[in-house]
Each structure stands twice: as structure tokens, then as C-alpha cells.
Image (cartoon, rainbow, N blue to C red):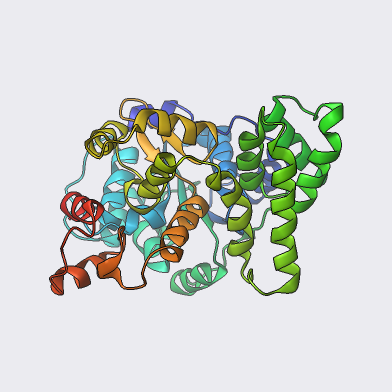
Amino acid sequence: MGFERIRYTPLDECRYPVGLDVYIDDLLSLLDIDSNDVRFVVICGMGGLGKTTIAKALYNRIFRSFKGSSFLKDISEEASHRKKGIISLQKQLLQDILKKESDITSVSGALIKDRLHRENILLILDNVDDAEQLDALAGGFNWFGQGSRVIITARDDYVLDVHKRNIGKDIPIYKPKELSFKNSLKLLSLHAFRENEPPEDYKQRSHEVVCYVGGLPLALEVLGSFLIGKVEEWEETLESLKNIHGDEDSGKSIKRYDDKVFGKLKISYEKLGDHVKTIFLDIACHFIGWGVEETIFLWKACELSPRLAIKELVQKHLLKIEGDNYERLRMHDLLRDMGRTIVMEFSSKDPTKRYRLWSHDEVFKVLKKDKVRPICLHLFLFTFYDN
């Protein structure tokens, strides 16, 4: 993606930016973009809270104030690929800022510093989950020119603590709160009814859904998109949400935060047809970041109906398609984790008997054991294309 297009074109934002203005105002105060010092700010919080959405909206508000800008999306996912990894991210960063490709063959923080220490830039590092990623992409305040701003989104405070020790300076951490009840109801209503408020005969049910889901934007978007036009599904959905909260209160089956959220998101997944479920799990395990057309070719070879499935997943906010000239499959990391958890729950713990493998370590372990009978077309595709 060339510099000029990024520099002058805003990022795609969410369809309904409910409650974003408060977050943006808070962050603008922390960033103080009129000052000439270099500043780092972290947006930190639980999955599904809308950190990436906030970062995109903030980027669009201020990127024209800088001579160069780069938004590196979903770094944890991109960095997990052996072939691409950190090197690919470093190349993209330099290309975004310097308008030309860079020949990087190994991870080099020194090279980033050398080439960008005079540049006035806005850099967004989205979804960081390892201090090494930060060390390689934004290892210090002296890596960038006067007035530069670096914004990091992350779930884990520990990653940031390690990085702060490495660069020897505190970094402000901004923790967005969940949406208020009023904004949660508005977001649910916009997705379910395309209105700011639910119709009168759905108000009580909508209030109950919000009470169970809370102010988590991702869950509200997924459930609202699932419930649109489905009168018969509201009572079943409420019953499922009540059961999830019953488990939560008893402490028997849902113990972690992610498990609670997964339960709410799975309501939408469970209503998918079998072939749509298959494609959803394929994407969650293997195809995030892949081009739409190349995956369609593979699914057609498996006698699936990928175009209809992708359309349904996008409509239900279980999948995003991003890119102007080359459309790619994208998925929220919570939905990705939910899909992989489903695979783990319904598959053998022995990787040689599993139909989907996404961990390089497990792939190599299976290959070393020579257990490559037709356990999976997915294993061969993933290994062949990604290494």
C-alpha cells in the first residue's frame, strides 16, 4: 500500500460511531499534537471494547497534521506468520512513511531509527501482544522526529510494562470505559432496527439484551446484526443470555472474561448453517489476511458456496472485508479466538488427529511424526502457502 494513498485517504471507520467522541476528546488531550516533543500513548483494555475502532477514528481526525502516517493493523496476527512477521511490518512502516520499498532481510530496529528519526509522523500500532513487537517498530522516543505521535492498542498491561522498562520512560495509558446503558441501547438498536431507539414493542426485550450483554460494542454489534428481522429469535436469544449469566454466577462453566464474551458471541455462530460454520472456522484458523478470491477458489474446490457464506458472515458482523484494490478477509481477534476455541473443544487434543491446525509448532510436530494422512486439506494449504 503506497504512501500517497495512506497519507491522503482516511481509514474505513465503523458504520455507527456511537460514543466515540468522548474517547477521542480524552486522547486528543493526552496527545497534545501542537507540542513538538515525541509522545507515545497506549489505548489498553479488554477485547471487544472497540480499541481499534477508537484508534481508526483518532487517526482520521489528526493524520493530516503530520508529514507522514502509518496504521499497522492487527500486529499480533501479522507477527505470528514466520514468512511475513515483524520484517513485513517494518517494511510496511518504512514504505508508508518514505514512499518507497525498503530491502529488509532481518529484523532491524536500528534501521527504523536511522531512517525515521527526522520524520514527523503519526504511527498507530494496533493490537500489540508482545514487547518485542514494540521494540522492533517503536523502540524509543528518539526513533522519530519532532512532534511525532505513536499510538498503541493492546489488551495486556504487562506488555507495556516491559516496553516502558526498555525505553526508560513512562507512557500514558488510556483505558476506555464500556459504553453507557444509553449508548449500548442505541448501538444495539442501530444494528437490529436501523433506528436510534428500538420500536415500542421491542423496547423491553432490547433493554434486557443490553443488561445481559453490557457495554461491549462487539457483542452488541454481533447480536444486533443477528437479531435484525427475526422476531422468533429474540426470546431464544434472551434465554441463551440468561443461561450464560447463570453459569457465570455459579462459577462452574464460565470462569474467564473471554469465556463469558464467547458465550454471547456464539449465539450468532450457532445459528449459522453447517457450510457457513465451516467457512467461518476456516477463516478464524487459517485465512485472516488472505485475499477473498484466492480463498473462494479453495472453498469451491471443497464443494462449498463461499460467496454466499462470506456475504452472510459480513452481514452478521462475524467477518470484515477490507482493502480497496485487493480485498482481504479480516476478523476481530475475539471472534478469531472464539473460532479457534470451538475447534479445540470439538477436536482431539492430539494435533495429529485434528482437522485444523494454525500453530506452526503443531504443524511441524505433526510433520515430524509423519502423521500426514488426510487429516486435513487445511494443514497442507496452510503449510504450503505460509512457509
Q: Give the x, y percent position of residue 360.
A: 26, 64
Q: Which of 326 and 204 is in front in this view?
A: 204
- Viewed as shown, does residue 314 lie left or right of 348? right
For image coordinates 26% across by 47% down, the residue present is 91
For image coordinates 76% across by 45% down, the residue present is 209
Q: Quadrant of residue 23?
A: top right
Q: In which quarter of the image is residue 55?
A: top right
Q: Give the x, y percent position of residue 149.
A: 51, 48
- Viewed as shown, does residue 275 lie left or right of 233? left
Q: Which of 299 and 126 is in front in this view?
A: 299
Q: Which of 234 and 14 is in front in this view?
A: 234
Q: Give the x, y percent position of residue 2.
A: 30, 32
For image coordinates 35% across by 36% down, the residue present is 328
In this view of the protein, can residue 214 be seen by the observer?
no
- Viewed as shown, does residue 290 lie left or right of 321? left
In this view of the protein, can residue 47 be seen by the observer?
yes
Q: Which of 286 and 8 is in front in this view?
A: 286
The image shows residue 348, relative to residue 244, as above or below, that is: below
- Which quadrant: the N terminus? top left
Q: Give the x, y percent position of residue 198.
A: 80, 30
The image shows residue 206, relative to residue 7, as above or below, that is: below
The image shows residue 251, relative to residue 119, as above or below, that is: below
- Which quadrant: the C terminus? bottom left
- Viewed as shown, does residue 384 lie left or right of 98? left
Q: Quadrant of residue 28?
A: top right
Query: How many badges with numbers are in the image?
Result: 0
